[in-house]
């Protein structure tokens, strides 16, 4: 009798696993839920009750400088399937793109959104060491606002040393640094030391146009314009405290060398845009840590210091249950950055 009861209970459990669990899972999938690794914020991706607003998909997102399609499909009047959005939205490297030795860029990459620091009349829009400097369009606008506000506070010595750098030019700087270290070190050690100071060609953020090296008029006179002493100048201190307000981060912090693989560079700032710069500053992360934070904690709802609302989420196209993932329709696509083999980090600005 005891054996019969055990077998009967086991058969009931098998039936539960075989029929009930799949039925519940299918219901959840068809309801448009998002698998988010257990985040309690998953409900924020569901349709907004009572909302009559259709998906807003402007032809031009001025903040990120991206052309957006005007015919993104909607779901339940006010939602958009992420999978469909990615099919319609041309995706390239976004503002959060991770560039390092493990994540190199192509040698022939020349960003389309590069802008000169000169206006149409040849007048500099922003102080620069040379007049041939080019920067990502959104990063240039943010840098101009940052320089203007620094000047209002009496800091008139900020200068852009360099920004966009081609693969060939990066290779020249890297080879030159390796050759320098070969004078007192073996070949392998020379490469190791050089790589911590000058990124190998293809592994430099400068090739994206999103990175800027800063200096000051005073440091230029010393002949050592890229120096850790930049952090001790009034301009360097101001950048360290305020650059996040304009969408920039100090890319290679002093306490993150083990994670970035690059020495402390207080002069090297990287445009990631708002809200990411504000969140990175708040969390105390470097970019490598922050991207993993998004992947593990997605979706993230955030209100910036200026009151703008954002939703940041990680989407992995290799998971079949993500095919039904939805996002509320009253948004603007601020940025889409590929991350990992099949993943995307999607930043939405909510209306």
Image: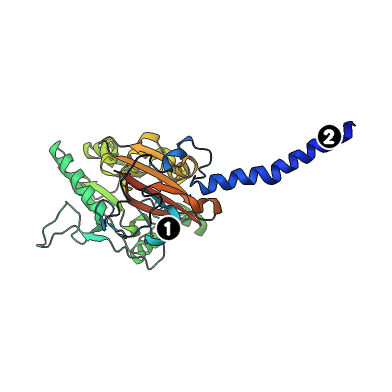
- The quarter of the displayed image where residue 242 is located: top left
> Which of 206 and 279 lies nearest the eye of the viewer?
279
Residue positioned 15% across, 54% down in the render = 125
Q: Among all residues in the image, which is located at the extreme right? A: 1
Few, some or many residues within 10 Å of mark 2 (<14, 14–19, 20+): few
> Which of 74 and 323 lies nearest the eye of the viewer?
74
Q: Is residue 218 visible?
A: no
The residue singled out by tag 1 in the image is: 84
* Quarter that holds the N terminus: top right
Q: How many circles with numbers are drawn on the protein? A: 2
**Between marks 2 and 1, how big is the CA–CA gap?**
49 Å
The residue singled out by tag 2 in the image is: 6
* Quarter that holds the C terminus: top left
> Position of 7 compared to 139: left or right?
right
Return the mark for residue 244: none
Residue positioned 74% across, 39% down in the render = 13
Element type at mark 2: helix
Q: Is residue 282 visible?
A: yes
First in sequence, mark 2 or 1: give its number.
2
- The quarter of the displayed image where residue 155 is located: top left
Give percent across and percent down for residue 298: 46, 42
> Which of 84 and 263 lies nearest the eye of the viewer?
84
> Which of 252 and 117 lies nearest the eye of the viewer?
117
Question: Which dot, 2 or 1, sits closer to the camera?
Answer: 2
Element type at mark 1: helix
Give percent across and percent down for residue 196: 43, 50
Few, some or many residues within 10 Å of mark 1 (<14, 14–19, 20+): some
């Amino acid at each position: 009798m005891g054996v019969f009861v055990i077998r009967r209970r086991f058969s009931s459990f098998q039936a539960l696993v075989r029929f009930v669990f799949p039925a519940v899972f299918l219901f959840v999938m068809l309801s448009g839920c998002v698998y988010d690794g257990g985040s309690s914020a998953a409900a924020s991706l569901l349709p907004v009750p009572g909302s009559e607003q259709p998906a807003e998909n402007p032809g031009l997102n001025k903040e990120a400088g991206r052309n957006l399609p005007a015919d993104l499909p909607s779901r339940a009047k006010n939602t958009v399937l992420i999978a469909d959005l990615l099919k319609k939205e041309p995706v390239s490297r976004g503002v959060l793109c991770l560039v390092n030795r493990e994540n190199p860029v192509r040698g022939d990459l020349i960003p389309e959104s590069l802008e000169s620091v000169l206006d149409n009349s040849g007048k500099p829009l922003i102080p620069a060491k040379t007049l041939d400097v080019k920067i990502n369009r959104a990063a240039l606008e943010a840098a101009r606002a940052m320089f203007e506000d620094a000047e209002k506070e009496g800091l008139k010595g900020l200068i852009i040393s360099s920004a966009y750098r081609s693969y060939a030019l990066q290779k020249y700087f890297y080879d030159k640094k390796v050759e320098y270290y070969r004078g007192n070190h073996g070949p392998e050690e020379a490469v190791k030391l050089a790589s911590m100071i000058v990124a190998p060609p293809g592994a430099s953020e400068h090739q994206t146009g999103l990175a800027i090296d800063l200096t000051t008029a005073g440091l230029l006179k010393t002949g050592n314009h890229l120096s850790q002493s930049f952090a001790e100048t009034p301009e360097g201190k101001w950048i360290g405290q305020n650059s996040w307000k304009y969408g920039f981060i100090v890319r290679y912090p002093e306490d993150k060398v083990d994670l970035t693989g690059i020495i402390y560079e207080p002069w090297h700032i990287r445009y990631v845009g708002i809200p990411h710069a504000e969140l990175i500053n708040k969390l105390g992360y470097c970019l490598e840590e922050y991207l993993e934070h998004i992947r593990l904690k997605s979706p993230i709802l955030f209100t910036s210091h200026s009151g703008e609302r954002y939703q940041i989420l990680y989407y992995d196209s290799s998971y079949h249950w993500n095919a039904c993932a939805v996002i509320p329709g009253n948004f603007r696509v601020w940025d889409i950055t590929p991350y990992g083999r099949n993943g995307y980090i999607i930043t939405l600005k909510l209306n």
